[in-house]
Image (tube, coloured by chain):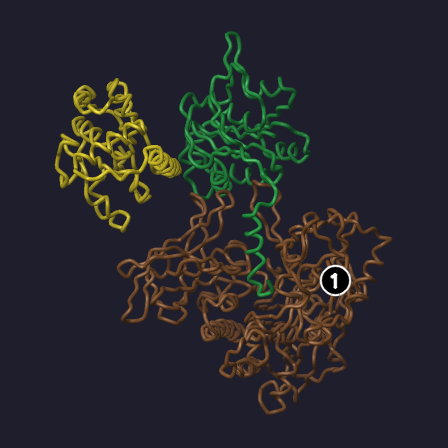
Amino acid sequence: MKKVIVIGLDGFEPKIAETMMSRGELPNLMKLREQGGYSRLKTTASAQTPVAWSTFSTGTNPGGHGIFDFLTRDTKTYLPLMALSRYEQKNAFVLPKVVNMRRGTPFWDLLSARDIESTILRIPCAYPPDKVKGRMLSGVGVPDLRGGFGTSAFYTTRTGLHVESSEKVVNVNVKDGKVSTHVIGPRDPKTRSDHKFDIHIEVQKTENKIVISSQGQPEKLEVQLGRWSKWLKVKFKVGMMQSVSGIVRFNLRQLEPDFELYASPVNFETEEPLFPISSPQEYAHDLAMKIGRYYTAGMAEDHDGLNNERFDEAAYLDQCRIVLRERRKMMEFELGRLEKGFFFCLFDTPDRLAHMFWRFTEPNHPANKGEDVSRYARVIEEHYRECDEIVGEAMRHADADTLFVVLSDHGMNSFQRGLNLNTWLHDNGFLALKPGFKPGESGDFFQNVDWDRTQAFTLGLGGIFLNMKGREANGIVGDEDAEKVREGIVSGLTGLVDSDRGTVAVRSVVRREAVYQGPYAGEAPDLIVNFSEGYRVSWDTPLGGVPQGLFVDNTKRWGGDHVIDPALASGVLFMNKKFRADAPGLVDLAPTILNVFGVAKIAAMEGSDLLS
Amino acid sequence: MKILVFDLNGAKRTKLFGDERLENLCRLMDMGCFGELEGNPREWNILARHESHTLTLGEFLIQAGKEFAVFDDFAALQAKLASGAWDCCQYSASFSAEGDSTDPYLDFDLGLGETLHYLSDDTALVIVGESCFVLVASNNPITGYQDGSTLDLTPTILELAGYPLPSAAEGKSWVAGMELNNSSGLTEDEQAMLRERLSGLGYI
Amino acid sequence: MDSKTVIVVSGLPRSGTSMMMKMLEAGGLPILTDNLREADANNPKGYYEFERVKQMKDGDLAWLPEAVGKVVKIVTGLITYLPSEYKYKVIFMRRDLNEILSSQKKMLGRLGREDDNIPDDKMAKVYEEHLKQVRGWLVRQPNIEVLYVNYNTMIADPTESLQKINEFLGGGMDVQVMAGVVDKELYRERK
């Protein structure tokens, strides 16, 4: 065979797909199932996008690539750190460099070494991108211009608005139908203030629109009420001779009684991104010249805008469609010129959309708060149909000499209840607060945690770290006591019942050596908590909060999740060739694809060729 | 603090400051302060004048028990910096008026860029051209344009690097009486920044 | 002088820019002015302004060919809009900030406008920062040469300052005639 085409559908849930196929829907996926086969696909511990796709890339368990969660901890400060990449700066006089924390050997390195070309679009955990023969566009992990996963801005004449997470609220005045304000750019580390790009807004009430004038491109940008604007290219002067460009979209929410305008996080512009987002470096821009500007941030969908209720479901759906359309254009352009080699394109939207619309499929979901859910109850299925169409489009580029694969990294499930995992550790004597403090009196970042009396803590999405002597800054657990602490947590937490509901919230707690092997296993959390369906760590947990009470309702619009027991969070695998359907896993894809091209897998790759 | 001086004899302000292609120099200008100096450009390193003799920056440092090493090529300078065993180094070069086929300013910027990799944060770095300068030090409270007398530069460098100035010093340190920037732990502001960085995942 | 050089007189309002214009005119240099703003009690010898420079920030640069070889007054707030295709020799007027502030107040008073009530020390800070920005910009322009002229020094001893100016502009001006312009009357605000 000379071509391998892999279409990634992030978070595509097998139970939904199977139900739809049983009704005769998703015709292209059904065709694939008939031609080759279909199976659920074993995901990683934990079932998170960066962890799972890194296993797809490298063919190893997370111990072999070093990505265990979106977050990890700084052993010196106990603060949460981005686990996917790091900025390293040799000293204050040189520019920082971004370093990918996904290690191991991705299979496209082996293809490149054999002169086989790859086209890889939006692969997670490749920021900065891997140097491939061919081209690569980085996906999840690429930040916005402020360095985070996405900080939006909300312009309003309303005062006293509560500022939610990952947003800036800008109070504006409308004077004679005009608003003068600015787009918020990167922060100046020296002055600690934000760089700004001036915009002037003309309100045209009778036509339900605004016109944004600026020195950006275009100079005048129209924004219709309730609609997403086109991209505005903005430029921030970050030094006397240095500037950075970005692109931003607006959504006009309301003109009266209050003026409300949403601005997306400012994405890297492709011509001169702050840090490389493609390999070769000019590829991202070449692609933009062909298909137009596109979202470059790893988290392209503005789920926080919806979560913070800055816009509604309809606007979010519109935005998801824009992202999907852009991605589809990329795919079609590249498939159109693909003659041989490896092709991959990831569609993130099935995941981001299902996170936000899951609650509508469960009338009893606490986030619904009595809302009529029927209007959006079918959105996920409709989106799955669109994904099926994209699969159909891609399949037209697969001939008899092509291995064609559709897969997801994990599934999707309900998230109705959150467990305050640090609070459980506190209540059971593993985590101590400073004298005089009770749970609920401690903020994020382990504020008021007494490290000298703390044996274990959690941050991120379900990993528990022991406070180990010689490893953590104020470690107190010696090697000789570690197993006793772990045993205490495992036995106490396994089978934990949510007494309000009478259901088991925690199915199991596993020791890291049971799931991780390899050179980076030592960086993993010491224990991994496997939640039941409907449960997850609470919103306060990932950044090190110790709130009051054990279980809380999830009342956020982000009502679906998949960071549960990986056994319950499998993804899907469709191939156009017959394959071994005996519990295939993400680890098996690398050996399978390598074998198609006659390239031997390396020893670190744990899986096996599914076609043999 | 360590001191690294680039003494660029005859280097023109219009070239050093005005050429966007000199990326490393531009970045350093944005990081620290820069400007023009009034007075005899070759006297910038004079700290004090006594009847019989003139005290220069180098002599002062040697008297203070420090090593003061002068280089005229980047490779040797970088080798010294890489060893880590140095207090004060000076790189000296002459820029002829006109007519060179290769652009010596671009070459300098390239060499400068490579050299920066060998530094540690606790370095006061100064580039001196003809009647102009760039000064970068982590504790330097002055940013952007700064002008003054040629004789003020050396006292400023010494004060930033933590040396007590001799009473006979002719010039005046620009940062005299100013609070120097010293880094501290994680402030609330930085916590907010960290939170912003990690939010937007949808999981927080 | 280079055929594409424009001579610019700049500085904060009330730093002596009009007087410098007058002196350069007396020294024999052609002036670019439209005399839209007539002489008044604040500037008895006229303002020497060229109205179109104010439109530089909106992109109107069509007048620049006309300015080559001539002197034009451009306040500090506008000077950074000068396009890089031309060469400039800038005479930048400096004056004690307190004097500038008190002179500006008097001028507002004569114009019958109300004092904006911004404290002097605050205003001085704003001006200092502005000057720092402008001078930081000027020093980075390879096509711009700047001569800083101190108003107070020039009033005290015109000849020395004027010789420097003459040298800066390539010589050939009548320094004696120029010195005659330094009308000590103008310095009536010194206290």
Viewer-side residue, A298 vs B49? A298
Viewer-side residue, A443 vs B175? A443
**Chain identifier matching the yellow colour in the rendered picture:** C
Q: Position of residue A206 (x, y in %)?
A: 27, 71
Q: Residue at 28% x, 38% y: name it.
A: C117
What is the quadrant of residue A290 in the picture?
A: bottom left
- State how many labels appear: 1
The three-letter code of the residue at mark 1 reads Gly
Viewer-side residue, A532 vs A147? A532
What is the quadrant of residue C12 in the picture?
A: top left
Residue projecting furthest to the right: A480
**Chain identifier matching the green colour in the rendered picture:** B
Q: Position of residue A515 (x, y in %)?
A: 78, 66
A271, above or below B124, in the image:
below
A284, above or below C65, in the image:
below
Secondary structure under badge 1?
helix
**Label 1 sits on residue:** A64
Check the rendered structure and report the hue given to chain A. brown
Q: Residue at 73% x, 74% y: name it.
A: A504
* B22 relative position to A452: left or right: left
Q: Position of residue A283 (x, y in %)?
A: 52, 62
Residue projecting furthest to the top: B51
